[in-house]
Amino acid sequence: MMTSQTQLWKGSPFSIERKPGKAAGTVIFCLQGPFTARDMYGSLTPDDLQNMLNFQSAPDEQPPAVNILDLTSVPYMDSAGLGMVVGHYVRCHRKGVRFVAAGATPRVRELFRMTKVDTTLPLADKVEDADTL
């Protein structure tokens, strides 16, 4: 008799924090927890999440030169999370803002590889590597 196992992520809920990078004009978005539709919209509304990723916090503020998504603490990502990452990359590209996804765990990197997103998105092994480019 075969049984199936479901892996549940026990840890902190999804959160995102926006902070300045070391290099001038760099913004780092630190994501934590499973980046899935259920988890991200369980803690933030779609509008709140989108507002967090917006380029400007004030009407007269210039967009940052570099956006880094810190994925170090993201154990898992589903298609909704992947869509948010790709959508943010597209917005950055259109605005002339350099985008780097950094610190992806092996499972998230495998998702990028399987979907061929790794051939489009700039990836860095560590946030420190992306922040000094």
Image: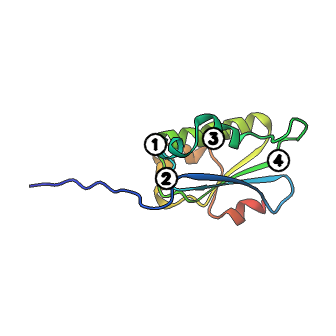
Q: Which residue is mark 3?
A: 49
Please state which of the two labelled residues, at mark 1 or mark 2, is closer to the viewer.
1
Q: Which residue is mark 4?
A: 65
Which one is earlier in the sequence, the residue at label 4 or at label 2?
2
Query: Looking at the picture, which amino acid does disc 3 mark?
Result: Leu
Q: Which residue is mark 1?
A: 38
In the image: residue 24, left or right of residue 30: right
Q: Which mark is residue 34?
A: 2
Where does the image place residue 132, in percent across and percent down from the top left?
78, 63
CA gap between label 4 and label 3 equals: 21 Å
Image quarter where the N terminus lies is: bottom left
**Quarter of the rendering containing residue 102:** bottom right
Disc 4 vs disc 3: Cβ atoms closer than 8 Å?
no
In the image: residue 27, left or right of residue 104: right
Disc 1 vs disc 2: Cβ atoms closer than 8 Å?
yes
Name the residue: 29% across, 54% down: 6
